[in-house]
Image (cartoon, rainbow, N blue to C red):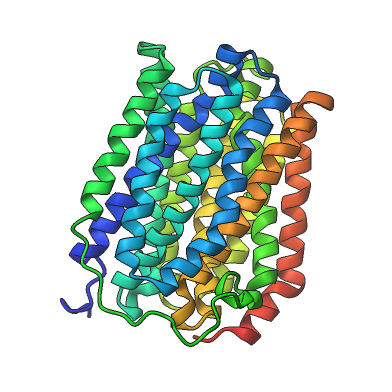
Amino acid sequence: METVKERLWNRNFVKVCFGNFMLYFSFYLIMPLLPLYLHDTFNASEQMIGIVLAGYTVTALIIRPFGGYMVDSFPRKTVLMICYFAFFAFFAGYFLAWTVLLFAIIRTLHGFAFGSTTVAISTMAIDVLYPSRRAEGIGYYGLSNNLAMAVGPTIAIYMYGVVPDFHYMFAMSLITSGIGLFALSSVVARPRETVKEKPPMSLDRFFLVKGWREGATTACFSFSYGVLSTYLAIYGEKQLGITSGTGTFFMLMAVGLIASRILGGRSLRKGKITQNAGAGMVLSLVGYTLFALVEMPWAYYSAALIIGLGNGHLCPAYQTMFINLAPNSQRGTANSTYLTSWDAGVGLGVLVGGWAAEHIGYHGAFEIAAAVNAAGVACFFWFVRRSYLANRLR
């Protein structure tokens, strides 16, 4: 029976989850509209849109290994507050972006703040969880991302339909991220010793070398998501005539994510990590394949639910795998390696998807996404699962 001392939803964990929700809500509030913003405001092509938006992901990718080093080496609460404030402040920069080049610079710099903040806040979430509730807690922590994914794009598209002004959306992101920053300011972190015994430039301070196989397959899965999420709105409008369905797509995806995380939380608590990961990746592959091969509205929306169900099992299981491969002194590094791998795949997906959409069409881009996803699934069942079971520490 759960004791008060080791309850899952302790006060600090609730605050961290709320702060994380506001972080991702402010992010997703503008994400689905940015391709339209660049196209309508600067007349950018699909390939140019991919290049501009990939900058955010590339800088998040670059900073995350250093973010892991920082949260393992300095007071985590201090690192979190500095990074989150930078993330909040950069939203004000979008009001100054009068050219596509200036927008690209601000967006790219914003990626540094986002990448470091996500490492710091996810590590803080693990710190405020009791060890007995950690695997289960990681799954529920991810629900805050999923709720933001559901609510953010839906509200954004509705608000843009009522007030078609992109600067209004930038202002909303600035306000909501500020609320998250305020909520996190009262989190009380448990005392911990900072890492001192390792040389500051050793590779394992920045990247969990033992998790490279898991990292490579994570990139395969996120590659598919990068292609689909970036070109979803334009594809729906141009190919299917769906002018207001992007919000519904993300809502259905989030319903699947939430349902699978609730259902999978108990099995994660029982230690069924690889089973959850395997089931999730197979479901996601079915969804991406359906989306790529069937050009019909029913397939468009069905794929959203199936991908959501798959990723809801896959993502917390994979993050737990990274945590279980690392000693406690490298939690930040483990988190940053997982998130870096995810960003690497998303960034490549955005770039390759932009090229493919312009030269071989949207279906060609989505077929490439499904093929890369299938390669990740094959690698997991072929050797990644066995490697994880042999190298895990807990």
Q: Residue at x 31, y 55 (%)?
A: 81
Which image quarter: residue 133? bottom left
Q: Is residue 121 left or right of residue 206?
A: left
Q: Residue furthest right?
A: 360
Q: Quadrant of residue 350?
A: top right
- Residue 23: x and y in percent read 37, 45
The residue depicted at 69 percent of the width and 80 percent of the height is: 387
Q: Is residue 220 above or below residue 148?
A: below
Residue ranking furthest to the front: 200
Q: Is residue 38 left or right of residue 2?
A: right
| Number of numbered discs overlaid on the protein picture | 0
Q: Is residue 330 above or below residue 176?
A: below
Camera-side residue of 132 and 201: 201
Q: Is residue 28 above or below residue 328?
A: above
Q: Nearer the viewer, residue 286 or 8?
A: 8
In-front residue for pair 313/388: 388
Q: Is residue 178 visible?
A: yes
Image x and y of residue 62, in percent: 60, 54
Image position, residue 155 (x, y; %)? 37, 27
Residue closer to the observer: 287 or 138: 138
Work out which quarter of the rendered image holds the N terminus and state it.
bottom left
Tell me, yes or no, if residue 366 can be seen here: no
The residue drawn where x is 70% and y is 63% is: 216
Q: In the rendering, at what x and y percent does residue 385 appear?
A: 67, 75
